Each structure stands twice: as C-alpha cells, then as structure tokens.
Image (cartoon, helix red, strand yellow):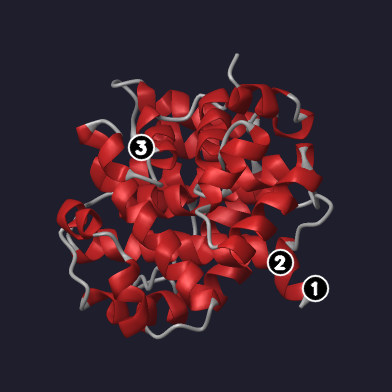
C-alpha cells in the first residue's frame, strides 16, 4: 500500500458513497438497462430525488420547461448526465459534516465549485460532450486536500505555508513532507470509491497532464487549467495575468487558447453563486 492509499484507508467517514449511487452506477453499467430502470432507482431515494430535481430546474441548467419527475429528468438530460449529477450531489452530502482542523471549509468548497465550473465551461467550449463529467472531476480535483488535512493537519498546513513563502510547487513540498501529494490522494480516494477509471486518472494527472496516459490527458489538462485559473482568481489576478501562467501543453491538449480565459472566467463567475447554493446550501447559510 503506497502512502496515498494508506492515508485514504484511515478515513472512515469516506469509506463508501451512498448505496443509491452504486445502484445508479449498476444501471448504467448494464447495457440492457432502460430510462425507466434508472428512474426507478433514483425515485426510490427521496433525498436524491429532491436534490436532482432542484438542480435540473435551476437557472444553471436553463431548461425551457420545468421538470417535475425523475423520469422526465432522465429523458431530457440522458442517463449519463443524471448519473453525474447524482454523483455530485452524493459527494456534497457526504462531506457536509466534515470540518478538518486548520481548514476553511467554506473556502475549500467555494473553490471546488469554481474549478468544477471552469472545467465544465472549458469542455463545453471545445464541444467535449458529457459536460457533467467534467463538473464532477473539477469538484473532486482537490478532494485529496480534505483527506490530508483530516489525517495530517499539521504537515498539510506546513506544506501550504512553505509553498507560499518559498515559492515552491505545492505538490513537491507535499511529497517531501507527507510522502504524497493532493492529486495522488484524491485519485486514491476515487479509486477506493470504485468510480470510473477516467475520473481517477484525470485527478491523478492534473499536475502534469502530459505525464498521464494519452487517453486521459485532455481531462487532466482541463483540471490543470481549472486549478491555475482558480488559484489566480484567489490572488486577484486579471484574466490577462492568469493566461501566461497556464502551461503551453495545456492549451494544446484542451484545444483552448489563452484568449478563452476571460470568457471561461466570466461564465464560471456568473454561475458560481447559484451552483454553491445548489450543492452546498450550508455554505450560504454560514456566510
């Protein structure tokens, strides 16, 4: 067991996703399943049904007419997109009560939503398809830090401080102090949950996308872009200042251009408040 897997193994609260998600995943993995099969599984869980319909009917999705039933949601959005929304809502509910020491959870989830929106918007601009997959990947891209601050709060905070004061890449300092970095831990958690390999590969490869398998490099590059942009926005940098911070390989892998940063940022910022309220209403209540 490597260090990242060891760290994940010690978090009992994150042992597994809700049963309804695994049932949904089972339906998608069965080639004989129908829209009605998925609708029945989701409808059997009242909490997931409420959250799904709330999300689908939000301004964020912008559907022309109101969706009143799960079956209608599946018909309009498709089975894969409903799966991705159920996954996102399951994750957000799982972590609702977690608050590791030394960690600002409002900031953490706010930034996670921003990364999710940037990844989704970038994917939409290059017509990547299955947009909610990129949203989920962005939402989970930094999940490794939640585990690290839960398991090793002192050293995790030390790594962050040292990275900022010495101008060193955070992942390099984390590997030195903790034996693994946030991307490795996040990928280990996603693997523990038995989520699709494409998701864990993108999270693992987000630091250096070209170092991962070629079929996953596009997804990893979008997560890299989302991180660079979110970090730059936290530092109050303009879009023109953020664009040069993105590695040239990321532009090549995603098909995006530096000039797209301003548009991606605008769309993500416009939707941010709405999406935080949808997936993490407790953050709004605490604000």
Q: Label 1 to label 2, Cα distance in Å?
A: 8 Å
- Left or right of 181, for residue 220: left
Please name the residue that numbered disc 1 is placed on. Answer: 286
Q: Are marks 3 and 2 in contact (CB under 8 Å)?
A: no
Mark 3 or mark 1, which has the lower sequence index?
3
- Provide residue 7's location: percent of width, then percent of height: 69, 28
Q: Residues within 10 Å of mark 2 (few under 14, many from 20)?
A: some
In the shown orientation, is residue 194 left or right of residue 44?
left
Q: Secondary structure at mark 1?
A: helix
- Residue farthest to the right, as pictured: 101
Which label lies toward us, 3 or 1?
1
| Disc 3 from disc 1: Cα separation | 38 Å
Q: Are marks 3 and 1 in contact (CB under 8 Å)?
A: no
* Labels 1 & 2 near each other (Cβ < 8 A): yes
Can residue 187 be seen at all in this image of the molecule?
yes
Residue in the picture at 73% in, 53% down? 157
Q: How many marks?
A: 3
Q: Residue at x 21, y 66 (%)?
A: 125
Per the rendering, the mark at residue 227 is: none
Q: Residue 229: percent from the left, percent from the top?
A: 41, 69
Q: Which mark is residue 35?
A: 3
Relative to 156, 136 lies left or right = left
Indicate the quadrant where residue 61 lies.
Answer: bottom left
Q: Residue at x 35, y 81 (%)?
A: 241
Closer to the N terminus: mark 3 or mark 2? 3
> Label 3 crowding class (10 Å Cα cut-off): few <14, some 14-19, many 20+?
some
Which residue is identified by label 2? 106
- The secondary structure type at the circle numbered 3 is helix
């Amino acid at each position: 067991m490597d260090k990242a897997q060891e760290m994940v193994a010690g978090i009992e609260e994150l042992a597994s996703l809700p049963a309804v998600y695994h049932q949904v995943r089972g339906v998608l993995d069965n080639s004989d399943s129908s829209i009605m099969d998925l609708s029945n599984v989701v409808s059997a869980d009242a909490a997931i049904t409420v959250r799904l319909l709330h999300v689908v009917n939000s301004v964020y999705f912008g559907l022309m007419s109101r969706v009143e039933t799960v079956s209608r949601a599946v018909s309009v959005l498709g089975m894969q997109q409903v799966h991705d929304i159920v996954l996102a809502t399951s994750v957000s509910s799982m972590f609702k009560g977690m608050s590791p020491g030394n960690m600002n959870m409002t900031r953490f989830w706010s930034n996670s939503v921003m990364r999710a929106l940037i990844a989704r918007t970038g994917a939409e601009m290059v017509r990547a398809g299955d947009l909610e997959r990129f949203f989920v990947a962005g939402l989970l891209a930094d999940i490794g830090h939640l585990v690290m601050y839960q398991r090793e709060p002192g050293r995790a905070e030390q790594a962050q401080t040292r990275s900022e004061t010495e101008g060193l890449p955070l992942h390099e300092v984390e590997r030195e102090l903790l034996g693994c970095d946030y991307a490795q831990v996040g990928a280990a958690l996603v693997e523990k949950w038995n989520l699709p390999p494409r998701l864990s590969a993108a999270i693992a490869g987000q630091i250096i996308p070209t170092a991962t398998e070629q079929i996953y490099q596009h997804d990893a590059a979008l997560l890299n872009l989302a991180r660079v942009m979110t970090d730059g926005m936290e530092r109050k940098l303009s879009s023109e200042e953020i664009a040069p911070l993105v590695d040239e390989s990321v532009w090549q892998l995603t098909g995006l251009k530096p000039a797209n940063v301003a548009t991606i940022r605008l769309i993500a910022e416009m939707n941010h408040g709405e999406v935080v309220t949808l997936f993490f209403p407790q953050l709004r209540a605490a604000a």
